[in-house]
Image (cartoon, rainbow, N blue to C red):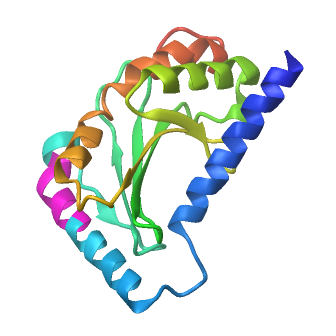
Amino acid sequence: MKRATLIVLLSLTIFGSAIAAQTTSSTPLPPDKQANRDATREKLRALLADNAVKILGVPVKQSDKNPYNFSGMTESAYKNVKGFEIVIGVSTDETIGFRIYPRYGAGYINIDKARNPAALMRQMVTLSNHNFLFWGADDTGDVFAGYTITLESGFPDEAIKVILYSVKPLDQYVGQMRANIDGSTGVP
């Protein structure tokens, strides 16, 4: 059991680190790649301006800290979470990454603070196998649902809309995780 837990934790750590590396880079890009990244950011900005409020009920705005990230916070009447923080990043590797953090209790769901971390990670891996969005944890242990789109075939307008529509149903999966997060089965 300890070995399985270690493998799951190592996989989530490596995966989370790889995603973080996608959206940040200290090495300047060649001019053509930089122009493509800028163009992708502007297409994403326009799509979010036209669709985020309609689909999510909240605007998704450009980050002050990273000009290639956009974020928004939903606060609808969910059964299991207080809302979702959505972070969308345009990477240096011609991808768009989505990280959707459930707001739970006073903050995020964190593996290190969970009632049963091993069972929570196992559940996340299983849900990743059965869901449209995958489940992961970032470098601080905060749990998110995510999706990464490659831009090899052009800008994926409709795929981005499908991902935005997939945010609200995530509440039911957090409900399935509750017993491993804090031991409760009721509203946070």
In the displayed image of the protein, which residue is found farthest to the right? 2
> In this rendering, does residue 64 appear at all?
yes
Pick the residue in front: 3 or 54: 3
Residue at horizontal 21 percent and vertical 57 percent from the top? 48
Residue 129 sits above or below residue 73 on the image:
above
> In this rendering, does residue 107 appear at all?
no
In the displayed image of the protein, which residue is found farthest to the top? 185
Give x and y (percent) for residue 140. 69, 48
Residue 77 sits above or below residue 187 on the image:
below
Residue at horizontal 40 percent and vertical 91 percent from the top? 31
Check if residue 174 falls in the magenta segment.
no
Label count reads: 0
In the displayed image of the protein, which residue is found farthest to the bottom? 31
Check if residue 50 falls in the magenta segment.
yes
Give x and y (percent) for residue 123. 60, 19
| Residues in magenta, as a range | 44-53
